[in-house]
Amino acid sequence: MAHVHELYDFTIGAFIVFEDKVLLMHHKKLSSWIQPGGHIELDEDPETTLWREIEEETGLSKEHLTIWQPEDRMPFFDETGEHKRLPIPFDFNVHPYGPGAKHKHIDLCYVLHSDTDKIKQNADESSGLKWFSKEDLNDAKDSLWPDIYKRAMFILNVA
């Protein structure tokens, strides 16, 4: 989806972990390794976008993934059935769409655990998908955006 608003758009980011590795995609337009994700469409809530973007960009389906959530989350009360409980992002940030860009993304970033490492690259979305270990991240540190490197390392240390 193209940008909806001139200055800000809401987006989803997904750091997917399998065993001791995190999945990153090589974004074609940005020419950098980043987490899978994308724009929240006007007819979607964040969770719907999360599942759609992951499947489009990695081939991983909801059946193979679990969203990491805090253990002490408040119980959900909805006696009417009219409310939907959304997962809590592990990070919620604003960043420019690429270095120096005026357009910014308000990003809800999630951590997910996968029960498989079988992925399928969508050539329209990226020029590569790769599972990065801590060692791989350290080797690629100089070519990764600092926030991507720091979040990926943090996740591999705690998730």
Image: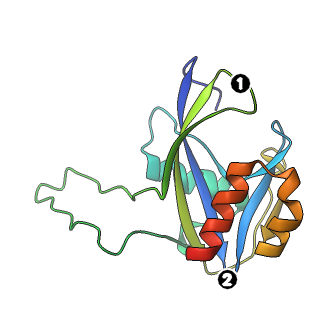
Comparing 150 with 47, the one in front is: 150
User: Measured from the top left, where is residue 93 in percent x and y?
Assistant: 52, 43
Identify whether 21 is placed above or below 125: below
Query: Disc count in the image?
Result: 2
Q: Is residue 64 visible?
A: no
Label 1, label 2: how far apart the Cα atoms are: 35 Å
For label 2, count other residues whose C-alpha is less than 10 Å away and answer few (under 14), some (14-19) or many (20+): few
Among numbered discs 1 and 2, the one appearing first in the sequence: 2
Under mark 2, the amino acid is: Glu
Mark 1 or mark 2, whichever is nearer to me: 1
Q: Which residue in the rendered view is the most extreme toward the left?
A: 79
Q: Which residue in the rendered view is the most extreme toward the top?
A: 6
Identify whether 87 is placed above or below 68: above
User: Measured from the top left, where is residue 117 in percent x and y?
Assistant: 73, 77
Comparing 55 with 90, the one in front is: 90
Q: Is residue 79 left or right of residue 6?
A: left
The C terminus sits in image quarter = bottom right
Q: Which residue is mark 1?
A: 101
The N terminus sits in image quarter = top right
Checking the image for residue 19, the label placed there is: 2
SS type, badge 1? loop
Q: Quadrant of residue 65?
A: bottom right
Identify whether 142 is placed above or below 103: below
Under mark 1, the amino acid is: Ala
User: Measured from the top left, where is residue 139 in percent x and y?
Assistant: 89, 66
Comparing 143 with 17, the one in front is: 143
Residue at (55%, 64%) from the top-left corner? 111
Residue at (28%, 54%) from the top-left corner? 84
SS type, badge 2? loop
Q: Is residue 9 left or right of residue 126?
A: left
